[in-house]
Image: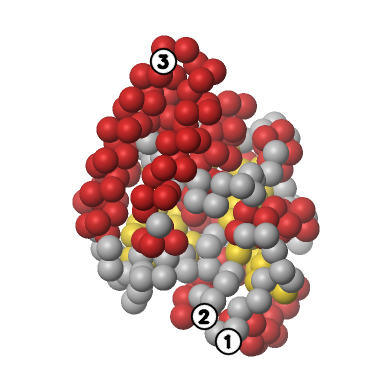
């Protein structure tokens, strides 16, 4: 019987049957870790629920299925976190995937009682799971190689799917803001960073999938606008440094818009 802390991964899921099985298996096939995966589906009609029920027969109690309406992605994740039993937490969207060995690698950093979090690196894949956009991956790695709060205000360089934390930090920071539909993770990580700086891990933890139905591909302008408004709220508390960060955030946002055009499938 393992003495390692339980890891709980939340997976919001809606109409992603094409990628869902790979996402689920990428979590539940992790080795040498005690874990549970909670899939939150508010009403998929594309075969996702049938697929999940078949996977439930394979993975048993490690796969928890919750089929109920929600008030958006942030609400689904919050509900999953409230149900989760684990000390170590994270979420993975149902079109992304974890890399083998990820959860085993994060255990030593997050098992303590004090608030902690960390992020690693993330690849970018296409609909078939092939690695793409290597320059963009390099740039993200370069920006995220060292963390500072004010640098984080200038640009969101932390990959959500490659970020994990422990329950003490989640309880100290509070749950996701349901009013933020596109920057819920950015806002959460800014709150985390005001409590404690993250550990920066140089290895790869996950892959982010780019496809025609991805929210990040469809709502780029709206995403950048919401990110700016989020940063403006935090920058107001940091005087001239906050104002300077806000200026650089606008500059980097223009570059990000170009990057998303390059990533467009």
Where is residue 125 shown, x and y percent of the image?
A: 34, 65
Distance (Cα) linking label 1 and label 2: 6 Å
Q: Secondary structure at mark 2?
A: helix
Residue 66, picture quadrant: bottom right
Distance (Cα) linking label 3 and label 1: 50 Å
Q: Residue at x 42, y 50 (%)?
A: 222
Q: Secondary structure at mark 1?
A: loop
> From what the image shows, is residue 130 above or below residue 112?
below
Residue linked to disc 2: 17
> From what the image shows, is residue 265 above or below residue 237?
below
* Residue 29 visible in this rendered orientation of the protein: no
Q: Secondary structure at mark 3?
A: helix
Residue 72, picture quadrant: bottom right
Residue 171, picture quadrant: top right
- What colouring style does the render use? secondary structure
Where is residue 238 shown, x and y percent of the image?
A: 50, 16
> From what the image shows, is residue 118 above or below residue 210?
above
Point out which mark residue 47 bears.
1
For marks 3 and 2, give the one nearer the viewer.
3
| Few, some or many residues within 10 Å of mark 1 (<14, 14–19, 20+) | few
> Pointers 3 and 2 in contact (CB under 8 A)?
no
Residue linked to disc 3: 241
> Pointers 1 and 2 in contact (CB under 8 A)?
yes
């Amino acid at each position: 019987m393992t003495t390692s802390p339980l890891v709980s991964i939340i997976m919001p899921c809606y109409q992603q049957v094409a990628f869902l099985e790979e996402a689920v298996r990428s979590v539940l096939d992790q080795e040498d870790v005690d874990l549970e995966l909670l899939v939150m589906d508010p009403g998929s009609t594309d075969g996702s629920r049938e697929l999940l029920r078949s996977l439930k027969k394979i993975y048993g109690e490690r796969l928890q299925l919750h089929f109920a309406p929600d008030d958006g992605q942030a609400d689904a994740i919050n509900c999953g976190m409230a149900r989760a039993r684990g000390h170590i937490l994270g979420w993975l969207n149902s079109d992304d995937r974890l890399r083998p060995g990820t959860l085993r690698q994060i255990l030593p950093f997050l098992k303590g009682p004090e608030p902690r979090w960390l992020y690693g690196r993330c690849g970018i894949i296409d609909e078939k799971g092939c690695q793409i956009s290597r320059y963009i991956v390099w740039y993200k790695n370069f920006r995220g190689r060292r963390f500072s709060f004010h640098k984080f205000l200038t640009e969101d360089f932390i990959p959500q799917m490659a970020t994990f934390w422990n329950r003490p930090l989640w309880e100290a920071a509070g749950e996701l803001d349901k009013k933020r539909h596109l920057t819920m993770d950015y806002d959460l990580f800014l709150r985390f960073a005001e409590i404690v700086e993250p550990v920066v891990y140089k290895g790869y933890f996950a892959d982010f999938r780019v496809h025609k139905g991805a929210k990040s591909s469809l709502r780029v302008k709206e995403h950048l606008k919401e990110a700016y408004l989020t940063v403006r709220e935090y920058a107001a508390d940091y005087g001239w440094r906050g104002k300077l960060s806000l200026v650089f955030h606008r500059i980097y946002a223009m570059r990000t818009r170009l990057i998303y055009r390059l990533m467009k499938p």
